Amino acid sequence: MPVSADTLLRTLRRRSAPTPTSPTVVGLDDFAWRRGHRYGTIVCDLEQRRTIDLLADREIGTVMAWPKDHPTIQIVCRDRGGGYREAATKGAPQARQIADRWHLLENASAAFLDIVRRHMRHLRRAVASGDVDSKRLSAVEKRQWKGWLRRDEVNEKVRTLHRSGTALKAIARTTGLSRQTVRRIVRGARDDVFRSRESTLDRWSYRLESEWSAGCQNGTELWRRLRAAGFTGSLRVVSEWRTRKRRSVRTAGDYPPPLRMPSARMIARLLTTVRACKGEETVRLIAAIETASPAIVKARNLLDGFAALISAKQVDRLDPWLGDAAQSEMSAFAEGIAADKVAVAAVIEMWSNGQTEGQVTKLKLVKRQMYGRAKVDLLRARLVATG
């Protein structure tokens, strides 16, 4: 067509005004114009399974004005952000709000992780006793251990200054650290000795334990069997696992378990996954943590109970759960659930915000096709006008 790109864009922008609709079930979620800085709002018709409008920001006033112009709305599915809750309450007081199930479970997991982080210093003293035998460390772990010794000196200096009443800003100037790092040290979030990263062997741990128990304890043979089952990792990864396993079995009676203290995130993961697929050393670690910190065990049980009632949609168990959680370290999370109780109890409905999340994924794809440079009118034209 003998037409310039600018002319085509102007034509699209003239058609970018949303078509008047009368939705009854809508989903609200945010998307990033620039991650961590500026966000917009996507509005989806969950019955028609399509995006019906894009808003330039996620301010309460902007979001609240949209449902006011659409009085036919009966149900609003949203995430647990306080801004969307207030906007939906004021903009569509006649509508029933439904909290997103995925966000409920994600918020619960984040609350449990925060509890584990707060207990890390106590766990390290009670479980690992601060003793690390360098003979049982790999070369990478030895480097991490030496780096932690240097880092611990700085941590202790920061904690001493904080105990003396020095402000965080003054501590940052004195030590040369950023205020964020100082804050993490004071909160006990920088005490992990060994960095725990996700391994390609994580999803094969049950198979490895089974092969080991069956008598196959040769690294190369283990790797061959895993490779035949679909494993794509290298021989070195399996050989290192075999070496650590042999050291663990050989020295289990000579050293107080466990030797290595994982990160808070790894501990939270170990405590909330099935124990049957874990090795002997990991099982000993979990048992030691549960003995050292009953508060973490209680929080873990509350997390499991909340996940079960949300997954099974047994909202009649929500009030007893809130009563139990109020007397535990999950109380802050429970207060947030109680404040949003009506929307949380509405998870028994057939609607959820999962469909809206899928539309956000499509929006990201279209935005990246335009190198992220499209304004809201052009982005609306490509998403709303095309259905």
Image: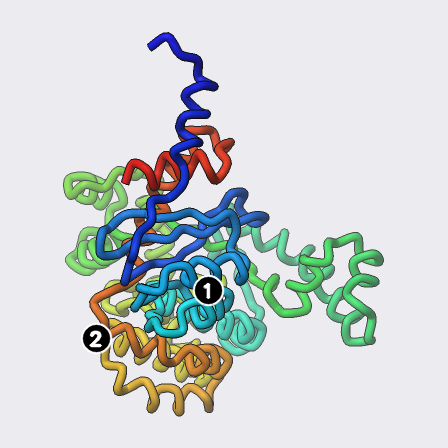
Residue 42 on image: x %, y % = 40, 51
Within 10 angstroms of label 1, few (less than 14), some, or many (20 or more) residues?
Answer: many
Q: Which residue matches tag 2?
A: 312
Q: Is residue 164 above or below residue 226?
A: below
Q: How is the image coloured?
A: rainbow
Residue 231, percent from left and from top: 23, 41
The image quarter containing residue 88 is bottom left
Rendered residue at 45%/53% (across/down): 30
Gap in angstroms between the C-alphas marked 1 and 2: 26 Å
Disc 2 marks which amino acid? Ala
Q: Which residue is mark 1?
A: 84
- Residue at left 52%, top 57%? 62
Residue 290 visible to the viewer = no
Percent position (x, y) of residue 63? 48, 59
Please state if 17 lies on the left or on the right of 202 as rendered. right
Q: Residue at x 42, y 37 (%)?
A: 379
